[in-house]
Image (cartoon, grey):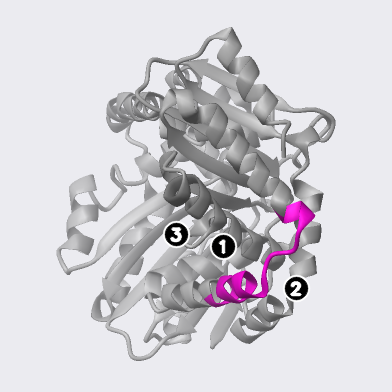
Amino acid sequence: MYKQSVLSNGLRVISHQLKPRDSVGLAIWVRVGGRFEAKSISGISHFVEHMLFKGTKHRTTKQIKEEVEGVGGMLNAFTGEESTCYFVKIPKAHLALAFNVLQDMVNHATLDPKEFNKEKPVILEEIKMYLDLPSQHVHEMMSELLWPEQALGRPIAGTLKSVSNLKRSDLAKHVKSYYHPRNILVTACGEIDHDEIRDLTARHFDRGGNGRISQFPKALFSTHSKKNHFWFLDKKTEQTHFVLGFHGLSRNHPDRYQLALLNVILGANMSSRLFEEVRERRGLAYEIKSGLGFYDDTGSIVISAGVEPRKAPLAIRVIMRELGRFKRKPVTEGELRRAKDYFLGQLLLGLEDTLDHALWYGEHILYGGKLPNLEEIRQKIEQVTQCDIQKLAGRFFKTGGVHLSLIGPLDATYEKKIKVECLCP
Protein backbone atom coordinates (compact mmCIF):
# COMPACT_ATOMS: atom_id res chain seq x y z
CA MET A 1 0.00 0.00 0.00
CA TYR A 2 1.36 3.39 -1.00
CA LYS A 3 1.18 6.29 1.43
CA GLN A 4 2.06 9.87 0.67
CA SER A 5 2.52 13.17 2.47
CA VAL A 6 3.25 16.70 1.35
CA LEU A 7 5.27 18.80 3.77
CA SER A 8 4.42 22.45 4.41
CA ASN A 9 7.35 23.50 2.21
CA GLY A 10 5.99 21.49 -0.75
CA LEU A 11 8.31 18.47 -0.58
CA ARG A 12 6.56 15.17 -1.36
CA VAL A 13 7.16 11.91 0.53
CA ILE A 14 5.82 8.57 -0.72
CA SER A 15 6.44 5.15 0.79
CA HIS A 16 5.38 1.59 0.18
CA GLN A 17 5.41 -1.04 2.90
CA LEU A 18 6.68 -4.36 1.62
CA LYS A 19 6.79 -7.31 4.06
CA PRO A 20 8.82 -9.20 5.01
CA ARG A 21 11.99 -7.48 3.86
CA ASP A 22 15.38 -7.06 5.48
CA SER A 23 16.31 -4.13 3.21
CA VAL A 24 14.96 -0.66 2.54
CA GLY A 25 15.22 1.11 -0.80
CA LEU A 26 15.41 4.88 -0.39
CA ALA A 27 15.66 7.56 -3.08
CA ILE A 28 15.80 11.34 -3.16
CA TRP A 29 14.71 12.70 -6.53
CA VAL A 30 15.45 16.18 -7.85
CA ARG A 31 13.38 17.48 -10.72
CA VAL A 32 16.26 18.44 -13.00
CA GLY A 33 18.21 16.70 -15.75
CA GLY A 34 19.67 17.11 -19.20
CA ARG A 35 16.48 18.62 -20.68
CA PHE A 36 16.79 21.70 -18.46
CA GLU A 37 20.21 22.73 -19.72
CA ALA A 38 21.28 25.36 -22.22
CA LYS A 39 23.81 24.15 -24.77
CA SER A 40 26.61 26.15 -23.16
CA ILE A 41 26.19 24.33 -19.83
CA SER A 42 25.24 20.92 -21.20
CA GLY A 43 26.22 18.25 -18.67
CA ILE A 44 25.90 20.44 -15.58
CA SER A 45 23.25 18.26 -13.89
CA HIS A 46 25.52 15.23 -14.30
CA PHE A 47 28.51 17.21 -12.98
CA VAL A 48 26.53 18.23 -9.89
CA GLU A 49 25.60 14.58 -9.31
CA HIS A 50 29.30 13.72 -9.23
CA MET A 51 30.11 16.59 -6.89
CA LEU A 52 27.53 15.63 -4.28
CA PHE A 53 29.68 12.59 -3.52
CA LYS A 54 32.74 14.81 -2.97
CA GLY A 55 32.03 16.05 0.51
CA THR A 56 29.53 18.02 2.60
CA LYS A 57 29.72 20.39 5.55
CA HIS A 58 29.61 17.33 7.82
CA ARG A 59 31.27 14.49 5.88
CA THR A 60 34.24 13.89 3.62
CA THR A 61 33.80 11.89 0.45
CA LYS A 62 35.37 8.91 2.23
CA GLN A 63 32.95 9.19 5.14
CA ILE A 64 29.96 9.35 2.79
CA LYS A 65 30.89 6.01 1.28
CA GLU A 66 32.09 4.32 4.45
CA GLU A 67 29.02 5.16 6.52
CA VAL A 68 26.73 3.40 4.05
CA GLU A 69 28.98 0.60 2.85
CA GLY A 70 30.28 0.01 6.38
CA VAL A 71 26.88 -1.31 7.45
CA GLY A 72 26.32 -3.42 4.33
CA GLY A 73 24.50 -0.87 2.20
CA MET A 74 25.04 0.43 -1.32
CA LEU A 75 24.94 4.04 -2.45
CA ASN A 76 24.70 5.46 -5.95
CA ALA A 77 23.01 8.03 -8.19
CA PHE A 78 22.02 8.67 -11.78
CA THR A 79 21.21 11.64 -13.96
CA GLY A 80 18.57 11.34 -16.63
CA GLU A 81 16.95 13.63 -19.13
CA GLU A 82 14.32 14.80 -16.64
CA SER A 83 15.57 13.96 -13.15
CA THR A 84 18.56 13.36 -10.92
CA CYS A 85 18.24 10.61 -8.32
CA TYR A 86 20.36 9.74 -5.27
CA PHE A 87 19.61 6.37 -3.72
CA VAL A 88 20.62 3.72 -1.21
CA LYS A 89 19.70 0.14 -0.47
CA ILE A 90 20.36 -0.50 3.20
CA PRO A 91 19.58 -3.06 5.93
CA LYS A 92 16.41 -1.72 7.53
CA ALA A 93 18.04 -1.25 10.93
CA HIS A 94 20.22 1.48 9.39
CA LEU A 95 17.50 3.45 7.60
CA ALA A 96 17.96 6.62 9.67
CA LEU A 97 21.72 6.60 9.02
CA ALA A 98 21.24 6.15 5.28
CA PHE A 99 18.67 8.93 5.14
CA ASN A 100 21.03 11.23 7.01
CA VAL A 101 23.83 10.58 4.53
CA LEU A 102 21.62 11.12 1.46
CA GLN A 103 20.03 14.31 2.75
CA ASP A 104 23.45 15.63 3.76
CA MET A 105 24.64 15.21 0.20
CA VAL A 106 21.56 16.94 -1.24
CA ASN A 107 21.34 19.72 1.38
CA HIS A 108 24.92 20.42 2.38
CA ALA A 109 27.33 19.60 -0.46
CA THR A 110 30.25 22.03 -0.39
CA LEU A 111 31.18 21.79 -4.08
CA ASP A 112 34.74 22.21 -2.90
CA PRO A 113 36.84 24.05 -5.55
CA LYS A 114 39.72 21.58 -5.23
CA GLU A 115 37.37 18.65 -5.71
CA PHE A 116 35.73 20.47 -8.63
CA ASN A 117 39.10 20.84 -10.36
CA LYS A 118 39.90 17.15 -9.74
CA GLU A 119 36.51 15.89 -10.91
CA LYS A 120 36.32 17.84 -14.17
CA PRO A 121 39.02 15.77 -15.93
CA VAL A 122 37.35 12.60 -14.59
CA ILE A 123 34.10 13.56 -16.33
CA LEU A 124 35.96 14.51 -19.49
CA GLU A 125 37.47 11.02 -19.50
CA GLU A 126 33.98 9.57 -19.02
CA ILE A 127 32.79 11.45 -22.11
CA LYS A 128 35.80 10.21 -24.09
CA MET A 129 35.03 6.67 -22.98
CA TYR A 130 31.50 6.93 -24.40
CA LEU A 131 32.86 8.35 -27.65
CA ASP A 132 35.23 5.38 -27.91
CA LEU A 133 32.37 2.88 -27.45
CA PRO A 134 30.48 2.67 -30.76
CA SER A 135 27.60 0.75 -29.17
CA GLN A 136 27.10 3.68 -26.74
CA HIS A 137 27.96 6.58 -29.05
CA VAL A 138 25.56 5.45 -31.76
CA HIS A 139 22.65 5.83 -29.30
CA GLU A 140 23.71 9.39 -28.49
CA MET A 141 23.76 10.10 -32.21
CA MET A 142 20.22 8.73 -32.47
CA SER A 143 18.97 11.06 -29.72
CA GLU A 144 20.29 14.04 -31.67
CA LEU A 145 18.61 12.78 -34.85
CA LEU A 146 15.26 12.43 -33.07
CA TRP A 147 15.47 15.80 -31.28
CA PRO A 148 17.95 17.98 -33.17
CA GLU A 149 19.15 21.30 -31.78
CA GLN A 150 17.43 20.82 -28.41
CA ALA A 151 18.48 19.65 -24.98
CA LEU A 152 16.70 16.30 -25.19
CA GLY A 153 18.94 15.35 -28.10
CA ARG A 154 22.24 16.14 -26.34
CA PRO A 155 24.34 13.69 -24.25
CA ILE A 156 23.46 13.78 -20.56
CA ALA A 157 27.16 13.97 -19.63
CA GLY A 158 27.59 16.97 -21.90
CA THR A 159 30.31 17.54 -24.47
CA LEU A 160 34.04 18.00 -24.11
CA LYS A 161 33.58 21.70 -24.86
CA SER A 162 30.64 22.39 -22.55
CA VAL A 163 32.10 20.53 -19.56
CA SER A 164 35.54 22.09 -20.06
CA ASN A 165 33.96 25.55 -19.81
CA LEU A 166 31.93 24.90 -16.67
CA LYS A 167 32.90 26.83 -13.53
CA ARG A 168 32.35 25.97 -9.91
CA SER A 169 30.05 29.00 -9.65
CA ASP A 170 27.86 27.52 -12.42
CA LEU A 171 27.33 24.40 -10.32
CA ALA A 172 26.52 26.44 -7.21
CA LYS A 173 23.91 28.42 -9.15
CA HIS A 174 22.43 25.18 -10.53
CA VAL A 175 22.07 23.68 -7.05
CA LYS A 176 20.46 26.84 -5.69
CA SER A 177 17.98 26.93 -8.58
CA TYR A 178 16.85 23.31 -8.47
CA TYR A 179 17.77 21.64 -5.16
CA HIS A 180 14.93 22.99 -3.03
CA PRO A 181 11.95 21.26 -1.35
CA ARG A 182 9.28 21.99 -3.96
CA ASN A 183 11.50 20.34 -6.54
CA ILE A 184 12.29 17.22 -4.48
CA LEU A 185 10.55 13.88 -4.02
CA VAL A 186 11.46 11.22 -1.44
CA THR A 187 10.47 7.60 -2.09
CA ALA A 188 11.06 4.57 0.12
CA CYS A 189 10.11 0.90 0.03
CA GLY A 190 10.50 -1.97 2.47
CA GLU A 191 9.26 -3.05 5.88
CA ILE A 192 8.99 0.56 6.98
CA ASP A 193 6.62 2.97 8.66
CA HIS A 194 5.48 5.91 6.58
CA ASP A 195 5.44 8.26 9.56
CA GLU A 196 9.11 7.52 10.19
CA ILE A 197 10.05 8.43 6.61
CA ARG A 198 7.92 11.57 6.75
CA ASP A 199 9.41 12.64 10.09
CA LEU A 200 12.97 12.04 8.89
CA THR A 201 12.24 14.12 5.81
CA ALA A 202 10.63 16.94 7.79
CA ARG A 203 13.57 17.00 10.22
CA HIS A 204 16.22 17.35 7.52
CA PHE A 205 14.39 19.33 4.84
CA ASP A 206 13.18 22.21 6.97
CA ARG A 207 14.10 24.94 4.50
CA GLY A 208 11.37 27.13 3.06
CA GLY A 209 9.56 26.11 -0.10
CA ASN A 210 9.84 29.36 -2.03
CA GLY A 211 11.66 27.90 -5.02
CA ARG A 212 9.83 27.42 -8.29
CA ILE A 213 8.92 23.98 -9.60
CA SER A 214 11.28 23.48 -12.51
CA GLN A 215 10.15 23.28 -16.13
CA PHE A 216 11.89 22.37 -19.38
CA PRO A 217 11.23 23.27 -23.04
CA LYS A 218 8.79 20.94 -24.79
CA ALA A 219 10.12 18.63 -27.48
CA LEU A 220 10.00 19.94 -31.05
CA PHE A 221 9.14 17.79 -34.08
CA SER A 222 9.01 20.27 -36.94
CA THR A 223 10.73 18.04 -39.49
CA HIS A 224 10.51 14.47 -38.23
CA SER A 225 7.42 13.29 -40.10
CA LYS A 226 8.34 14.44 -43.61
CA LYS A 227 11.62 12.75 -44.44
CA ASN A 228 14.27 10.28 -43.32
CA HIS A 229 17.26 11.31 -41.24
CA PHE A 230 20.66 9.64 -41.43
CA TRP A 231 23.91 10.10 -39.50
CA PHE A 232 26.91 8.06 -40.64
CA LEU A 233 30.23 8.10 -38.78
CA ASP A 234 33.19 6.54 -40.58
CA LYS A 235 35.30 4.58 -38.10
CA LYS A 236 37.57 1.58 -38.48
CA THR A 237 35.70 -0.89 -36.28
CA GLU A 238 35.37 -4.67 -36.38
CA GLN A 239 31.58 -4.29 -36.21
CA THR A 240 29.18 -1.81 -37.70
CA HIS A 241 26.88 -0.51 -34.98
CA PHE A 242 23.57 1.05 -35.95
CA VAL A 243 20.32 2.25 -34.41
CA LEU A 244 17.00 2.59 -36.19
CA GLY A 245 14.76 5.06 -34.38
CA PHE A 246 11.19 6.37 -34.42
CA HIS A 247 9.37 8.85 -32.23
CA GLY A 248 7.24 7.12 -29.60
CA LEU A 249 4.84 7.95 -26.77
CA SER A 250 5.04 10.01 -23.60
CA ARG A 251 5.33 8.45 -20.17
CA ASN A 252 1.64 8.73 -19.30
CA HIS A 253 0.12 8.27 -22.76
CA PRO A 254 -2.98 6.03 -22.69
CA ASP A 255 -1.50 3.75 -25.40
CA ARG A 256 1.81 3.15 -23.60
CA TYR A 257 0.90 -0.41 -22.61
CA GLN A 258 0.05 -1.26 -26.20
CA LEU A 259 3.47 0.04 -27.22
CA ALA A 260 5.16 -1.91 -24.42
CA LEU A 261 3.66 -5.16 -25.72
CA LEU A 262 4.60 -4.32 -29.31
CA ASN A 263 8.18 -3.82 -28.09
CA VAL A 264 8.21 -7.20 -26.33
CA ILE A 265 7.11 -8.97 -29.50
CA LEU A 266 9.50 -6.93 -31.64
CA GLY A 267 12.82 -7.24 -29.81
CA ALA A 268 12.75 -7.08 -26.01
CA ASN A 269 13.77 -10.69 -25.30
CA MET A 270 15.11 -13.89 -26.82
CA SER A 271 11.62 -14.95 -27.91
CA SER A 272 11.14 -11.80 -29.96
CA ARG A 273 10.81 -11.61 -33.73
CA LEU A 274 14.04 -9.69 -34.24
CA PHE A 275 16.11 -12.03 -32.08
CA GLU A 276 14.65 -15.05 -33.86
CA GLU A 277 15.01 -13.67 -37.40
CA VAL A 278 18.25 -11.66 -37.19
CA ARG A 279 20.28 -13.80 -34.79
CA GLU A 280 18.84 -17.31 -34.61
CA ARG A 281 17.70 -17.84 -38.19
CA ARG A 282 20.23 -15.75 -40.14
CA GLY A 283 23.20 -15.44 -37.77
CA LEU A 284 23.67 -11.77 -38.62
CA ALA A 285 24.28 -10.38 -35.14
CA TYR A 286 25.23 -11.39 -31.62
CA GLU A 287 23.20 -8.55 -30.10
CA ILE A 288 19.91 -7.35 -31.59
CA LYS A 289 17.27 -5.67 -29.49
CA SER A 290 14.58 -3.03 -29.35
CA GLY A 291 13.78 -0.58 -26.58
CA LEU A 292 11.51 2.26 -25.57
CA GLY A 293 12.21 5.69 -24.11
CA PHE A 294 9.43 7.48 -22.22
CA TYR A 295 9.57 11.17 -21.33
CA ASP A 296 7.08 13.70 -20.05
CA ASP A 297 5.88 14.82 -23.49
CA THR A 298 7.46 12.45 -26.00
CA GLY A 299 9.25 9.14 -26.39
CA SER A 300 11.28 6.89 -28.65
CA ILE A 301 11.31 3.44 -30.21
CA VAL A 302 14.81 2.21 -31.07
CA ILE A 303 16.27 -0.95 -32.59
CA SER A 304 20.01 -1.50 -32.22
CA ALA A 305 22.50 -4.09 -33.44
CA GLY A 306 26.18 -4.71 -34.04
CA VAL A 307 27.04 -6.69 -37.19
CA GLU A 308 29.90 -7.50 -39.54
CA PRO A 309 30.26 -4.37 -41.70
CA ARG A 310 29.42 -6.04 -45.01
CA LYS A 311 26.27 -7.58 -43.49
CA ALA A 312 24.79 -4.29 -42.23
CA PRO A 313 22.66 -3.62 -45.35
CA LEU A 314 21.13 -7.09 -45.13
CA ALA A 315 20.52 -6.77 -41.39
CA ILE A 316 18.74 -3.44 -41.91
CA ARG A 317 16.67 -4.93 -44.74
CA VAL A 318 15.59 -7.83 -42.51
CA ILE A 319 14.64 -5.45 -39.68
CA MET A 320 12.65 -3.18 -41.99
CA ARG A 321 10.78 -6.19 -43.37
CA GLU A 322 9.90 -7.25 -39.85
CA LEU A 323 8.55 -3.76 -39.14
CA GLY A 324 6.51 -3.97 -42.32
CA ARG A 325 5.12 -7.33 -41.24
CA PHE A 326 3.72 -5.73 -38.08
CA LYS A 327 1.77 -3.32 -40.28
CA ARG A 328 0.54 -5.85 -42.84
CA LYS A 329 -0.59 -8.65 -40.57
CA PRO A 330 -1.79 -8.86 -36.94
CA VAL A 331 0.48 -10.57 -34.45
CA THR A 332 -0.67 -14.06 -33.48
CA GLU A 333 -2.74 -14.82 -30.42
CA GLY A 334 0.16 -16.83 -29.02
CA GLU A 335 2.63 -13.96 -29.48
CA LEU A 336 0.34 -11.51 -27.76
CA ARG A 337 -0.37 -13.89 -24.86
CA ARG A 338 3.33 -14.53 -24.30
CA ALA A 339 4.06 -10.79 -24.46
CA LYS A 340 1.40 -10.04 -21.85
CA ASP A 341 2.69 -12.75 -19.52
CA TYR A 342 6.28 -11.61 -20.03
CA PHE A 343 5.48 -7.95 -19.30
CA LEU A 344 3.48 -8.72 -16.16
CA GLY A 345 5.97 -11.33 -14.97
CA GLN A 346 8.94 -9.00 -15.38
CA LEU A 347 7.06 -6.22 -13.60
CA LEU A 348 6.23 -8.43 -10.61
CA LEU A 349 9.78 -9.80 -10.40
CA GLY A 350 11.22 -6.29 -10.44
CA LEU A 351 8.88 -5.08 -7.71
CA GLU A 352 10.11 -7.74 -5.31
CA ASP A 353 13.28 -5.68 -4.87
CA THR A 354 12.86 -2.77 -2.45
CA LEU A 355 15.14 -0.37 -4.33
CA ASP A 356 13.78 -1.19 -7.79
CA HIS A 357 10.28 -0.70 -6.40
CA ALA A 358 11.10 2.72 -4.91
CA LEU A 359 12.70 3.82 -8.19
CA TRP A 360 9.80 2.47 -10.27
CA TYR A 361 7.02 4.40 -8.63
CA GLY A 362 9.20 7.45 -8.06
CA GLU A 363 9.67 7.82 -11.79
CA HIS A 364 5.92 7.35 -12.29
CA ILE A 365 4.88 10.26 -10.09
CA LEU A 366 7.73 12.77 -10.31
CA TYR A 367 6.11 14.47 -13.29
CA GLY A 368 2.47 14.40 -12.33
CA GLY A 369 1.63 10.75 -12.85
CA LYS A 370 -0.67 9.07 -10.35
CA LEU A 371 0.38 6.36 -7.92
CA PRO A 372 0.61 3.06 -9.82
CA ASN A 373 -2.05 0.41 -9.26
CA LEU A 374 -0.95 -3.11 -10.19
CA GLU A 375 -4.47 -4.37 -10.79
CA GLU A 376 -5.21 -1.43 -13.07
CA ILE A 377 -1.98 -2.07 -15.00
CA ARG A 378 -2.90 -5.75 -15.34
CA GLN A 379 -6.35 -4.84 -16.68
CA LYS A 380 -4.89 -2.42 -19.23
CA ILE A 381 -2.40 -5.04 -20.42
CA GLU A 382 -5.14 -7.65 -20.77
CA GLN A 383 -7.30 -5.24 -22.79
CA VAL A 384 -4.70 -4.87 -25.56
CA THR A 385 -5.76 -6.63 -28.78
CA GLN A 386 -3.98 -7.86 -31.88
CA CYS A 387 -5.67 -5.04 -33.80
CA ASP A 388 -4.27 -2.48 -31.31
CA ILE A 389 -0.72 -3.68 -32.00
CA GLN A 390 -1.21 -3.56 -35.76
CA LYS A 391 -2.66 -0.03 -35.67
CA LEU A 392 0.18 1.18 -33.48
CA ALA A 393 2.77 -0.29 -35.84
CA GLY A 394 1.10 1.50 -38.76
CA ARG A 395 1.21 4.72 -36.80
CA PHE A 396 4.93 4.62 -36.00
CA PHE A 397 6.76 2.43 -38.53
CA LYS A 398 6.60 4.74 -41.51
CA THR A 399 9.35 4.75 -44.12
CA GLY A 400 8.97 8.52 -44.32
CA GLY A 401 10.04 8.92 -40.71
CA VAL A 402 13.00 6.59 -40.35
CA HIS A 403 16.03 7.75 -38.35
CA LEU A 404 19.29 5.83 -38.70
CA SER A 405 22.59 6.38 -36.89
CA LEU A 406 25.54 4.19 -37.86
CA ILE A 407 29.21 3.84 -36.91
CA GLY A 408 31.60 1.70 -38.92
CA PRO A 409 33.81 1.56 -42.05
CA LEU A 410 32.09 3.60 -44.76
CA ASP A 411 32.22 4.75 -48.36
CA ALA A 412 29.70 6.51 -50.60
CA THR A 413 28.41 3.34 -52.25
CA TYR A 414 27.91 1.64 -48.89
CA GLU A 415 26.00 4.64 -47.48
CA LYS A 416 23.72 4.72 -50.52
CA LYS A 417 22.96 1.02 -50.16
CA ILE A 418 22.10 1.48 -46.48
CA LYS A 419 19.70 4.32 -47.29
CA VAL A 420 17.94 2.20 -49.91
CA GLU A 421 17.35 -0.59 -47.37
CA CYS A 422 15.75 1.88 -44.95
CA LEU A 423 13.04 2.57 -47.56
CA CYS A 424 12.07 -1.08 -48.04
CA PRO A 425 9.66 -2.21 -45.28
The residue sitting at 42% across, 76% down in the picture is 349
> Quick one: SS at disc 3?
loop
Residue type at the position of mark 2: Thr
Bin the neighbour count of mark 1 within 10 Å (Cα to Cα): few under 14, some 14-19, many 20 and up. some
Q: Which residue is mark 2?
A: 385
- Where is residue 255? Give x, y as percent: 75, 64
Nearer to me, 36 or 254: 254
Q: Is residue 207 left or right of 394 when viewed as pictured?
A: left
Of the two numbered discs 2 and 3 on the same chain, state the one appearing first in sequence.
3
- Range drawn in magenta: 326-341
Of the two numbered discs 2 and 1 on the same chain, state the one appearing first in sequence.
1
- Where is residue 27? Give x, y as percent: 43, 64
Bin the neighbour count of mark 3 within 10 Å (Cα to Cα): few under 14, some 14-19, many 20 and up. some
Q: Is residue 361 visible?
A: yes
Image quadrant in which you'd find residue 114:
top left
Q: Which residue is mark 3?
A: 270
Residue type at the position of mark 3: Met
Q: Which residue is mark 1?
A: 363
Q: Nearer the viewer, mark 3 or mark 1?
A: 3
271 in the magenta segment = no
